[in-house]
Structures are given as structure tokens and as C-alpha cells.
Image (cartoon, rainbow, N blue to C red):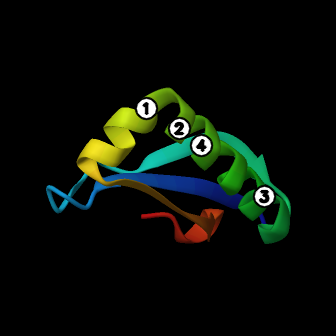
Amino acid sequence: MKYALVLIICSQLQSDCYPPLFSDKEFLTKYVCLQEGYKESQVILDNIGEEMVNDYDIIVRFTCQEKANLI
């Protein structure tokens, strides 16, 4: 089974989330997909910056979905 990484960026302060971001990469195992999710979350937080993350209470959530079950 192949997996796709789905990332969701939310502001807990505003109780709002951006639409899900779907990675272009395919992963052969859920384990590898989850590892990439943590790496991509770090990159996103670095790009947003500490001040904005703190000011807007930003969080990054992610999941690895089987390719056949994508929404």
C-alpha cells in the first residue's frame, strides 16, 4: 500500500485551519511517511517563524493516508 502525507496548518487563537496540503511524494510505508511528516512540520514552522507561531498559536498537524482512501 502507498501512503500520502497530508499536512494541516491551524491557528488555535483564531480557531481556523488552512485547507489541507497534500505532499507530492508517495511513501511505501506508513513509518516513512510519518518520519517525513515530522520533518515537513519542522520546515513549515521554520518558514512561518517563531514570532508568528507564538502570536497566532500556530500548530501543524499531519496524517498519512492510504492512497486509495484520500479525501
From the top left corner, tell me how far across and down residue 36 is, in percent. Answer: 74, 51
Q: In the rendered view, tell whether residue 14 sits above or below residue 63.
A: above
Residue at mark 1: 48
Density class for disc 2 (Cα within 10 Å; few <14, some 14-19, many ≥20) is: some
**Viewer-closest of 33 and 42:** 42
The mark that comes first in sequence, 4 or 2, is 4
Q: In the rendered view, tell whether residue 23 sits above or below residue 3.
A: above
Q: Which mark is residue 35?
A: 3
Find the distance from the CA under tag 4 to the CA under tag 2: 13 Å
Density class for disc 1 (Cα within 10 Å; few <14, some 14-19, many ≥20) is: few
| Amino acid type, label 3 | Gln
From the top left corner, tell me how far across and down residue 42 is, in percent. Answer: 62, 44
Name the secondary structure under disc 2: helix
Residue at point 71%, 41% (across, down): 25
Mark 3 or mark 1, whichever is nearer to me: 1
Find the distance from the CA under tag 3 to the CA under tag 1: 20 Å
| Amino acid type, label 1 | Ile
Residue at point 84%, 60% (across, down): 32
Density class for disc 3 (Cα within 10 Å; few <14, some 14-19, many ≥20) is: few
Quarter of the figure with residue 53? top left
Mark 2 or mark 3, whichever is nearer to me: 2
Name the secondary structure under disc 1: helix
Residue at point 42%, 64% (across, down): 71
Is there CB contact under 8 Å for labels 1 and 4? no
The mark that comes first in sequence, 2 or 3, is 3
Q: Which mark is residue 44?
A: 2
Quarter of the figure with residue 31? bottom right
Residue at mark 4: 23
